[in-house]
Image (spheres, coloured by chain):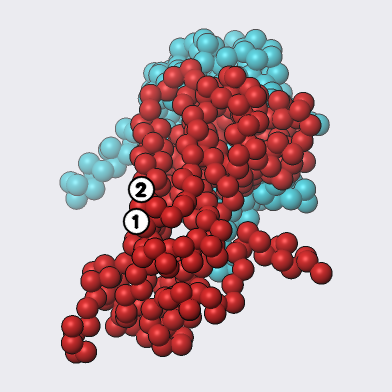
Chain colours: A red, B cyan
Amino acid sequence: MSKAAPDLAHLSAATREQLLLSDAERIHIIAAGAWLPLRHAKTALTKFEELLTHPKVTRMPCYLLVGPSYSGKTSILERFLDLHPPDLSPDQETTQCPVVMVDAPPQPDLSEFYAGILDALMAPYKPTSPKHEKLSQVKRLFRELGVKILIIDEIHHLIAGSLNRQREFRNALKSLSNMTKVSIVASGIEEAYNAFAADSQMSSRFVPIEMPRWSANGDLGEVLMTLERRMPLRKPSGLHMPGLMMAILARSEGTLGDICDLIKAAAIEAIRNGTEQISEQGLSRLDWVPPSKRKMYRRAP
Amino acid sequence: MSKAATPWLPLWPVRYKPLADELLSSWLIRLSHGMGLKVQTFCNLEFGNQRQVWNRDIDRFGPSWLIERLSQRTGTPLEVAHRTSLRAYDGILYRRFKSNGVLPWVLRLKMYHRTWLGHGLMFCPGCLAEDKEPYFRRRWRLALNTVCSRHRCMLLDCCPVCQAGVGFTRTDLGQPGQEDFMGQNVCHACGFDLRQAVAPPPGCLDEEAAAWLNQLWTEFEAGDFVPDLIEQLTVFHMICSLLTRRNRALHLAEYLGDRLGVEHPLTLQSWTPLETRSVDERHQLLQMAAWLMVDLPGRLGEARRAHAIRFNHLLRDFDEVPEGYRRIALSLQGGKAPAGEGFGAEHGREEHQDHDRLT
Ligand SMILES: [Zn+2]
Ligand SMILES: [Zn+2]
């Protein structure tokens, strides 16, 4: 290992080339945080992919992606959406839009939910029109635009309402899927899973996909190695080594989103201060609060 | 044609392009329904409540703000969008567009309290039945047209069950809570499926006249609007006006009725312009006028000698008379028609051409 040719085995080929870029450019690449091809995510994507070619049946298969906040659910869903962008070419008679993604409204309000779908489809609609009219517009547009999968992120918002509202919402989801033959992929925290499980029809329909829980084991080691290979730092950090892994887990509190954010922050700091590697000392000096805790932290007196 | 004034707007998710010969109003209806909206809701959302779309004959007026917006939001070239309105016939069917009164060859929509009365739009049940999604054609707004050239049947100009005017209407076709709007093939007044209507074969007063009309229509449909064709349309329209004008000494319609064996010419039932008449009236009237056109100098001369028309009728109230027609009219002043000056007459024209070739 000579100074002229540093050992770059810790980096992927593409990342090695990024070393030629300026510090500012490398920091930008890290902050932009490209998609991480992790095993559990790839498995989920394969399942979603199968929905696209699923024959139209009475009860279309649906999935519920379950996991705590910041566990990376949204980035899997966004990745899937990116893989299937709408065809917006002006020459077409309609936009072809196989995958639509919406956030669940903060309250179980069906009219708002349908409005969110219409917004995602970029359709004109009358905000004040009653929910059944919005629903019929959604149905017509699903047909026109060839929608196959409706992704609903943060579905747990829907369980904020009374049991009656929840039931109304669950029924609406079921009938929307039945009427349009569109598969639904919902994502939410544990409570959403429990709310779905309360309805036997719902729980049989929505197959859960659980996000992995990260602890100091080989799976996490794999994630950390993947992350390291994609960070354009000049020196190896050995993120998967037991000491550093434990430090990362401790500070990030174990959710994937926070792990990634922590490592991003540490890597950017390593470029700025010229150390070019992430170390336990570097982590401990980092002024960093997990995003999941930031609200509480700020609110604290 | 490009106007930079309109800001960029995103494409609509549903951006159907106009179908062959589709009318602006029909296109707008298909677009609204394709997006799951009632036409009026759609127009209010897109154009605001200020700009009323449905209380005017948008096909005749072809408002540029409407056409430009549809072009932009559907990714349709502006020329193609423009062609959906009857304004594309500016300078062809009529010399100058005007917003009031009768526009030559453009059927008049009569509107009363947001519904269309009268016979301003026709349809062919066979054409509607063949459409994947039934739509209305521009040619079904033209007074010149009474027969479907594809199905060789009469066009119909109202619902055969309830006699209501067909086509676009302000009372929306959609039923609330249904994503499937009724197609344009359904009578808005009684729900009858216009595709089921029976269209009779066209009646024929005179073979030659029918052939002349057919030839004119074929040339018109081909869309090659050469000056000859435009002049022919102008003169033909003048002759039709002579048949629908009330004038003490003008008995052209009666005379032609006699000549062609029509006992009670429909055209005599009222003195209204061609453009406000029913398809049956027009069909008879056009044939009578066409019979004259077959040999205009000769047959007008006969009519004059029979005291059905006077010289001064021929030019009165017409502005910008085509030169060929003026010559015919002037030749009738003395009482004799010049030979071989047939205006638009098939035979006359052929002779003329032969003559040219020989010299
Ligand atoms: Zn037809
Ligand atoms: Zn009717």
Q: Is residue A229 shown left or right of residue A180?
A: left
**Which residue is depicted at the point 56% across and 31% down?**
A140
Secondary structure type for disc 2: helix
Q: Quadrant of the N terminus of chain A?
A: bottom left
Per the rendering, the mark at residue A150 is: none
Residue A155 position within the rendered picture, expressed as x and y whole percent measured from the top left: 62, 40
- In three-dimensional space, the C-alpha distance between marks 2 and 1, rounded to whole angstroms, equals 9 Å
Name, please, the residue furthest toward the front. Answer: A243
Residue type at numbered disc 2: Arg
A149 vs B359, nearest the viewer: A149
- Give the vertical position of B37 relative to B321 (above or below): above
Q: Which residue is mark 2?
A: A39
Front disc: 2 or 1: 1
Secondary structure type for disc 1: helix
Neighbor class of circle 1 (other Cα within 10 Å; few <14, some 14-19, many 20+) is some
A183 vs A281, nearest the viewer: A281
**Which residue is depicted at the point 50% across and 74% down?**
A283
Residue B225 position within the rendered picture, expressed as x and y whole percent measured from the top left: 40, 47
Q: Which residue is mark 1?
A: A222
B275 vs A61, nearest the viewer: A61
- Of callouts 2 and 1, the N-terminal one: 2
Residue type at numbered disc 1: Glu
Q: Quadrant of the C terminus of chain A?
A: bottom right
The answer to whether the residue labelled 2 contacts the one labelled 1, judged by CB atoms less than 8 Å apart, is yes
